[in-house]
Image (spheres, rainbow, N blue to C red):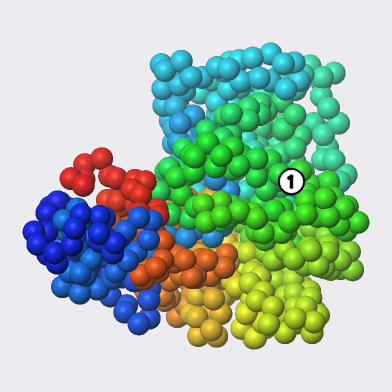
Amino acid sequence: MRRGAALRLSIALALAACGRAPGAPGAADIVFHGATVITMDEELPTADAVAIAGEHIVGVGSLADLRSLVGPETQLVDVSGTTIIPGINETHIHVRDLGFEQRTAVNLQPARNVADVQRLLRERLAELEREGRLGGWRYPPTGQVGPWLFGLAWTQDRLEERRMADRRELDAVSRDVPISLDRIYNGIAVNTRVFELLGIDFDNPATYPDWFRRDPPDFEAGDIIFRDPDTGLPNGVFMGTKAPLLVAPVIPEKTFEQTVESLVLGLEYLASLGITAVVEAGSRMGEVTRQYQAAYTAGRLPIRAVLYDGWYRSGDPDGIGDPARIRERLGALGFNNLGDHRFRVRGAKSSEDGGLGARSATVSAPYLPVPGDPLGARNRGMLREPDLARRSEQLRVLAEFGWELHVHAIGDVAIRRVVDIYKVLMDSIHAVRPDADLRWSIIHAYLPDEPGTSVIRDLADYGIIAAINPANLYYEGDSFVRNVGPERMTRHTPFRTFLEAGIRMASGSDYPNNSPDPWAGIYAMMTREIETSGEVHGPEQRIPFLDALRTFTLNGAYLTYDEDVRGSLEPGKLADLVVVDANLLEGAPAEILEMASRVLVTMVGGEIVYRRPDSEF
Ligand SMILES: [Zn+2]
């Protein structure tokens, strides 16, 4: 990949190019030329020019091929040295906190040790104080308004200490401002001020709740209250599904307006990475739908979004589990696919198990024992709905109302279980409607090919999509290795196996569980490298750049039934594209990791939604 190939702009009036009058039908508004165009169109895989009129692509080929599309008003833009790719379709993300993270919270992913955590928090605290943006948060129990410092995206596995900063270390950042830091998945760390808001005084045992000395009896696999070794009292770090809820009641919630603002800012940030469409994986019972709708109605959605409606299980804040109530709700909703190419609600998401880093994904061979896991070598994770008949019924009701099914399943046992339910449902639908086009997916699909539970054959036969998060391997691989060992890691998200079996992979980041940078996902597919250790597990599962890119473009469009209108660069499709300051067909994989900063232009429907500030464009 050649570096520094500056974008050369030449708005050239094409003098007498083909004698068309201004605005003549068929003339393009803009023609990018001189680039390496990667189309994802099998009939014309590469080209060097793309012509756009209105919101559509009207021509792809060489500049000479496109001459007839150049009118007097056509902008001819010389983008020599760059690569143009179809806009990236990010197929699994929860955008809502992204703008908030950019502006207000602290992203702790870069931290390598506890001192880094403290430094990042101090820096943001100082910035927010300086700009007068620290306060204004309403504390739920009292209604009192005050400051709060939020953080997110930490995991102890990325820190040298292999543990998260405890309350005293956070007190060293601030004893007065409450601090709450969300783990990438299922966890929270808080300072002493948060305990005080809960009415707890460490010096006064009379204020201790029941869980202060002993774990609650309803804890599940992965639930941990980390405790001070000397006193046995909570040290401020909580992990699992239930443990973090113990401190949740005092954490401020954003106002609706703040959430919409965060969403829009987040989508703008995604555009800067080259993303032109997202699948928002879960409505949280309508909460997220309302945010998108507000942004859409105000004309503020910079990129496209398809939103999955969400159901999990009883008692989960994200959903309901009773099949009769699901039926009632779907009946009242009255639609299963509504919207347009900018924003659509389609498909339903639910979850089968937990996570591999959190040791709650359901696996056939137990997790390797680690200190702090009360289940020790017996831990095989948990199922969100252990009752198979009830689980099958939940999914059957969704399918009956016409919703496509997208189920989070990470451990091999959970994946096997979902695929078995899918097969029965798909067979029954196809018995009545043989041509039904069912694009259901397994979300995450980390361990699909374990001995005794492999679903590879079934995914291929039933056309079930693997909706994967390749960058998790890069960012979180070390914790996976510790939990399942190097042998199983060789089969973690087996890219090559999927590809050779003819299974469609559609890639997403699962932000906020990982960085939303799609280029890290492409890099992970090409290298299978783990960021922190540099280790490579399962090198035979690597796949080439173009195959990786397809999972982030055309296959993503296919997942949401949009492959006829986007996902590749072909005449007639929406002009969703990215101009990258590099030649992506040359150069070392390592350069892929820099591509987020080398996106020059992102275009959605012919409109430029991101332009790198220093680009001449
Ligand atoms: Zn997710």
Q: Horizontal and vertical percent for residue 230?
A: 70, 32
Q: Which residue is mark 1?
A: 285
Q: Horizontal and vertical percent for residue 279?
A: 56, 56
Q: Residues within 10 Å of mark 1 (few under 14, many from 20)?
A: some
Residue drawn at x 53%, y 70% as measured from the top left: 558
Residue drawn at x 51%, y 19% as measured from the top left: 134
Q: Nearer the viewer, residue 246 or 4?
A: 4
Residue drawn at x 14%, y 67% as measured from the top left: 18
Say if 47 sits above or below 257 in the image. Answer: below
- Image quadrant in which the N terminus is located: bottom left
Quadrant of the rendered structure where residue 364 is? bottom right
Q: Amino acid at mark 1?
A: Met
Quadrant of the rendered structure where residue 413 is? bottom right
Residue 503 visible within the image: yes
Query: Number of callouts in the render?
Result: 1
Quadrant of the rendered structure where residue 88 is? bottom left
Q: Nearer the viewer, residue 446 or 404?
A: 404
SS type, badge 1:
loop
Q: Nearer the viewer, residue 604 or 459?
A: 604
Q: Horizontal and vertical percent for residue 80?
A: 15, 61
Residue 156 visible within the image: no
Q: Horizontal and vertical percent for residue 496?
A: 48, 80
Q: Nearer the viewer, residue 388 or 162?
A: 388
Q: Is mark 1 within 8 Å of ligand 1?
A: no
Is residue 588 found left or right of 94 in the rendered image?
left
Residue drawn at x 58%, y 22% as measured from the top left: 148
Is residue 237 found left or right of 207 in the rendered image?
left
Say if 328 sits above or below 529 in the image. Answer: above
Is residue 121 found left or right of 444 in the rendered image?
left
